Image: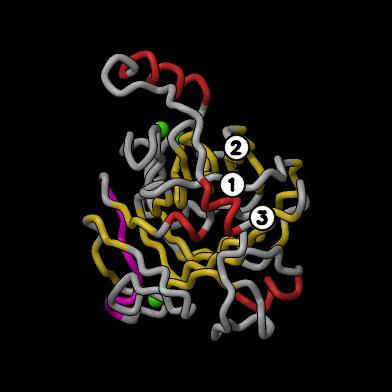
C-alpha cells in the first residue's frame, strides 16, 4: 500500500519479521507459463473464456469454474447477497479473510477480475478487496477503494490511486467492480460504466506465492501483516478471475 506507511511499518517491524526477503524463484511460473486453466469450464463468456476461478459463495468458498480452485474461509461469515438471498455472500471485517489458491494469479499476464462488493464502513485509508503477494513484494497486486478518491490498484508494488473516480460507492450498497489488465493498460468498470481514466501499468506476469492470494485484507508480508485500517469492511460476492483480458462487451455481459 502507500509507500510511506509501508516504510514506517517496515521500520517498526523489520527487526521482528523482516521486510526484505530473498528473491522468489518459483519454478511453477515458468512451467505453467501462465496457463492456469486448461480444461473446459462452464463460464458465461465464450466457450474458452479464460475463467480460472468463480466464487458464487453459495454457502461456501468452492470454485464453480470446474478448475478446483476452492478457497479457505478464515473467520469470514456468510451473509445475504445483493438480492437478499441468505448465505450467498461473505462478510469481511476485522482481520477476517478468505484465502484463495495462489496458482489462480501466479504467472498471470493479461487478466480480468470481476466481483460484487458492498462497503459497510469506509476506512480513511485503504479498503483492500483482493490482494496478491510474494515473499519479496507484498503489493504484487491489490485492488482497493481509496477514501475519498475512488478505486485504485497496486501492480508490482506501484500504486495507482484514483484509477476510477467520480462514482461513489460509499453508500452501503452493492456495486459491481471489474478491473482489467491488457498488456500495460489497466482499466476499471464500476456498475458497468467504464472509467475514462486508463492507467499505464506493468505488463510483467504476476508472481504470487502460496498463501499470497487474499480476499479482504492488505498483506504487508506474504500471507499476513493485515491492518483493520486497510481491510474490506463489508461484503463480497460473485468473484470471477479470468486469465485473459475480456473485451468491453464481454465485461458488460457480466453485469
Ligand atoms: Ca452469491
Ligand atoms: Ca498494509
Ligand atoms: Ca501491503
Which of the two discs, 3 and 1, sits closer to the camera? 1
Which of the two discs, 1 and 2, sits closer to the camera? 1
Q: Which residue is drawn at 35% across and 64% down?
A: 71
Q: SS for tag 2?
A: loop
Q: Where is residue 69 in the image (x, y as percent from the top left)?
A: 42, 68
Q: Mark 3 points at which residue?
A: 188
Q: SS for tag 3?
A: strand
| Residue 163, image quadrant | top right
- Name the foreground residue: 81 vs 137: 137
Per the model, the C-alpha gap separating discs 3 and 2 is: 18 Å
Q: Name the residue under label 1.
A: 206
Q: Name the residue under label 2.
A: 156
Please tell me whether residue 87 belongs to the stretch shown in magenta: yes
Q: Is mark 3 within 8 Å of ligand 3?
A: no
Q: What stretch is highlighted in magenta?
A: 86-94
Q: 88 above or below 201?
A: below
Q: SS for tag 1?
A: loop
Q: Where is residue 173 in the image (x, y as percent from the top left)?
A: 45, 63
Sequence-wise, which precedes: disc 1 or disc 2?
Answer: 2
Residue 20, can we see it?
yes
Amino acid at each position: 500500500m502507500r509507500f510511506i506507511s509501508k516504510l514506517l511499518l517496515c521500520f517498526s517491524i523489520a527487526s521482528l519479521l523482516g521486510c526484505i526477503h530473498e528473491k522468489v524463484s518459483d519454478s511453477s511460473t515458468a512451467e505453467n507459463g501462465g496457463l492456469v486453466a486448461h480444461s473446459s469450464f462452464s463460464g458465461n463468456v465464450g466457450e474458452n473464456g479464460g475463467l480460472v476461478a468463480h466464487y458464487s459463495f453459495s454457502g461456501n468458498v468452492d470454485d464453480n469454474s470446474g478448475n478446483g480452485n476452492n478457497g479457505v474461509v478464515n473467520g469470514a461469515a456468510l451473509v445475504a447477497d445483493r438480492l437478499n438471498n441468505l448465505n450467498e455472500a461473505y462478510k469481511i471485517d476485522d482481520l477476517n479473510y478468505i484465502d484463495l489458491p495462489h496458482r489462480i494469479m501466479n504467472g498471470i499476464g493479461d487478466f480480468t477480475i470481476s466481483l460484487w462488493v458492498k462497503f459497510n464502513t469506509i476506512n480513511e485509508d485503504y479498503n483492500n478487496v483482493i490482494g496478491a503477494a510474494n515473499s519479496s513484494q507484498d503489493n504484487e497486486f491489490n485492488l482497493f477503494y481509496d477514501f475519498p478518491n475512488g478505486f485504485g490498484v497496486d501492480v508490482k508494488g506501484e500504486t495507482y490511486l484514483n484509477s476510477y473516480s467520480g462514482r461513489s460507492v460509499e453508500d452501503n450498497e452493492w456495486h459491481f467492480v471489474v478491473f482489467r489488465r491488457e498488456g500495460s493498460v489497466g482499466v476499471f468498470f464500476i456498475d458497468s460504466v467504464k472509467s475514462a481514466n486508463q492507467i499505464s501499468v506493468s505488463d510483467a506476469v504476476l508472481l504470487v506465492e502460496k498463501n499470497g492470494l487474499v480476499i479482504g485484507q492488505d498483506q504487508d508480508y506474504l500471507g499476513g501483516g493485515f491492518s483493520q485500517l486497510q481491510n474490506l469492511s463489508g461484503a463480497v460476492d460473485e468473484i470471477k478471475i479470468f486469465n485473459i483480458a475480456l473485451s468491453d462487451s464481454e465485461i458488460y455481459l457480466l453485469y
